[in-house]
Amino acid sequence: MSTDERNTTGGSPTAASTTPKPYWIGLGLMVMGAVWLYNAFGLPQGARYAAVGPGLFVTVAGGALLVLGALLMVQIWRGETFEAQDAEDADGATKMDKRAFLTALVAVALPIVTMGPLGMPFTATLSFVLVANAFGSRRWYLDLVYGAVLASGSWFLFNQLGLQLGRFFPPLGV
Amino acid sequence: MKLSKTLAALTMTAVLGTGAAMAQVNVMLPANPGGGWDSLGRQAFQAMNDAGIYTGGVNFTNTGGAGGTVGLAEFLGTSSGQPDALAVFGAITVGAIALNNSPINLAEFRPVARMTAEYLVIAVAADSPYNTLAELVEGIKADPGAAALGGGSAGGVDHISLALLAQAGDIPVADLNYIPQTSGAETVTAIVNGTLVAGVSGTSEFAQFAEQGRIKLLAVTSAERRPNLPDVPTFKEAGYDVEIANWRGILAAPGAPDDNYAMWVDNFTKLSQSDAWKKVLEAQGWEDYFLAGEEFGAFIAEETERQGQILKDAGLVN
Amino acid sequence: MGTFELLLHGFGVALQPTNLMWALVGSVLGTAIGILPGIGPALTIALLLPVTTALAPTSAFIMFAGILYGAMYGGSTTSILLNTPGEAGSMMTALEGNKMARAGRGAAALATAAIGSFVAGTIATLCLTFAAPAVAELAFYFKPTDYFAITALAFCSVAVVMGTSRTRGFISLFLGIAIGVIGIDSMTGQARLTFGNMQLLRGIALTVVLVSLFAVGEILYVASRYRSTPGVMAPIKGQLWMTRQDFARSWKPWLRGTAIGFPMGALPGSGSEIPTMLSYTLERKLTKYPEEFGKGAIEGVAGPEAANNAAAAGILVPLLTLGLPTSATAAVLLAAFQNYGLQPGPFLFTSNPALIWGLIASLYVGNVMLLVLNLPLVGIWVQLLRIPRPQLYAGILVFAMIGVWGLAGSWVDLTIMLVVGLAGYIMRVYDFPIAPVLIGLILGPMAETQLRTALAAGQGNPMVLVSTPLSAILITLAVLLLALPILLKRLRATA
């Protein structure tokens, strides 16, 4: 932890990473708003007595996202700046490390595929190694041991408490 | 004495823990832990174990949501054709399937046993001008919109009981101003604070608030008066031919082998006669509503028909 | 027998060695559970129900009380140290508490949380002992329009208070509301935005979004811009303990948090989220150090933590005195009572005083126990921050994963974790505030249900929304909050 004042929301004024014109965020919000609005058209807007039906909040949320997305694009065009938030271990001003980001992303995505067929302890161990690697740990064999101990230990503890974490290692049926 | 109880609890924990590892029967509980379906499944197998009917391992899965249809859909996918896979479900599932356009067809599953029921009561605030069911029905008929009615989820048994009452009282079902509440407790508060003119919920949820003098119980949906509510008339006595219960039961996987299916029908039949189960019924305040095998299948088909029709009349299903 | 005498009898029950042991088991279990994201006291008690049938009811409920309070303590620890709130009630704690921990003041944050929880828990238990019947009646007075007015005010204040710009505050808020409408519409049973997926029918679980936005988003973000600066890691900087100034700044928020949390906990549906949000907003408005908010203001930890624990005691009030469960945890506790063939309510006080008063006394005991357990542990917990960063972040992901998977064992939830985690990453890169998303997600469905209930009961007449004094006042405040800054700007421009 350094002693500077970087850990603030909004970043330091000197941060040079002012992102140039992220129009796609505004566009993304508008697309999302359009999907919600489209869905709302299939829902009754009114109800017999309540005057408002199941479609109202969907319409409001979709409409608001559409308008706010457009507003954001206007603001970007007018020169609104976006500074990455600084965190304790992260520096908003540094360039994005693509390899580390993708490694961490794989660690987060992995469970979707392996959690069911290979079980929680195996998946968690693998994700542990990947995240540690993304953060620059190079002794993967040690991480493998740490991860395996943490994952199996939590599996036993929380399984005892009755949580449904599935089998320990499904391919072997245990 | 105290120590032995402690030890018993600890062994029980260990048994439950190891039980999951060497499970022989998979039971789908299509609700979150703590609710009625969850307790039915867990208590039934506990009692079976205590009575020595079935002492093997049990592996429970809780998958809640949408009146049990989410859990049953998953059960259909993972357990079809498996010998020892069971699921808990109930009256609410029947309505939810119709309401959510769920692809589930209850007739595909193999009906094991109907186990319990809870009857419904209709209540008004203690200071309400209505003192009998007939007065309430007349009041609703005069201005259906002004008489906000409440109970459990839309299309659930509470809603259906009110729809049946409306039909019996010559009120167009679609005119009812039904406002679903998230729990029996919310229904009580809404009746007391005047948001609802009348509300429906299970007898156990309303009885004590009537004893506290906050609400008046007008009628109960059983065929005969309940022993614990001797002063509350049935719908029939009040002049409306409505009988409905919130029942809960057990299904086996579609395509389960005949031998295994017969064994489970037999196990649950034995369970329903055991003392261990009688104790559970008493502790939980559940009514015995046992019906097994194909007869239960016929009952499910009947309920599907009846609830589907009433939901159509209410304008909830096309 | 007077209340005081009954309470003394209760202590006689609670202080028996076996019951003390169960209180300890519950406190430890609750703390452990609170640390795991997504696994709150409701689920734990529900899962323990079948196991505890072998116990005497008094012992079981004493253990449950320990779990209830312990989970609150445990939740604050992970929020502060790891920025991973375990449940919605400790979300606000993460906002300021984690900033404090990162500034090397983790011990002070944990201490003010623990002492604040103790103070709030004790005062709330006192109120429970002596004022329960009066507070319990509150549940019957608030109408749907009052609840709707509360949520409307919360929306307006949140979007205005948080974030670098109003546009971004509102974008976050509406993202949350948009996620909140997914699933079955509770009023009509219609599926909304489920795209034909069965699992989406039950909606997107709050805990999945909470864990993904805070923990997963943070992991992705820090990984992409990791600044490894060995040797500067300092879990404790300056004084290890709360300073005199920390105390001076904490005690009022503790009391205010208690005053908000206890009565609100007794109301149906408000749970621990709304009181903690209100307490945070209040402290932010009242503080003498507004510049510190968002950077680690101790008031922002002290208030919400006190409100959180007071609300936990608040839910017991209508449950014990009326048999009315006002939250998921209370509903599970009610099921536990019924498991033993007991019906909570006024009759239980006369029919089984040993159980009720033993339970109430054990709340005092449990609070002391948790304080004694937690204060010395603060030093140890803070050492968690000494774990090398790669393994620390990897461990956070493992716990996040267990929390999400343990909910329902569904790959759909894991996919949501990925998508929302990515959204959390983008929000950090482009500086969108995180908290309004969750507030929209929590309060959106509540606002919708209450609005539609109020309108249906009032046959569609919009005037029903301001038909009670409370709702009229709150709605006016909300409108003012939105309109005032604009009006002031106009006035200044013309002046």
Image: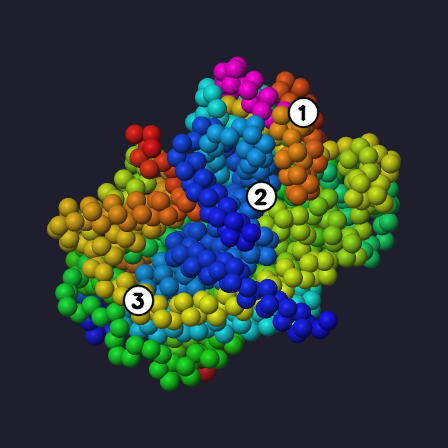
Q: Which residue: 25% across, 75% down? A: C237
Report in which chain the residue with disc 3 lies: C
Q: To which residue does mark 2 refer?
A: B35
What residue is pinned by disc 3?
A: C380
Q: Are marks 2 and 3 in contact (CB under 8 Å)?
A: no
**Relative image position of residue C399 (x, y in whole percent):** 33, 51
Q: Secondary structure at mark 1?
A: strand
Q: Which mark is residue B291?
A: 1
Q: Is residue C10 above or below residue C419?
A: below
Q: Inspect the magenta stretch and tell me whether residue B137 lies in it.
A: no
Q: Disc 2 sits on a residue from what chain?
A: B
Q: Is residue C319 something one can see in this rendering? A: yes
Q: Nearer the viewer, mark 2 or mark 3?
A: 3
Q: Residue at x 78, y 54 (%)?
A: B211
Decide if residue A81 is in sight here.
no
Q: Is residue B265 magenta?
A: yes
Question: In which quadrant of the rendered image does the N terminus of chain A lie?
Answer: bottom left
Q: Main secondary structure of the magenta part?
A: helix
Tag 3: residue type?
Ile
Q: Amino acid at mark 1?
A: Leu
As rendered, which of B272 and C462 lies closer to the eye?
B272
As measured in the structure, the alpha-carbon distance from the residue carrying label 1 to the one carrying label 2 is 22 Å
Q: Pick the quarter of the image with the C terminus of chain A.
A: top left
The crowding category of the residue bearing disc 3, from other C-alpha atoms within 10 Å (few below 14, some 14 to 19, many at least 20), is few
Name the amino acid type tagged 2: Gly
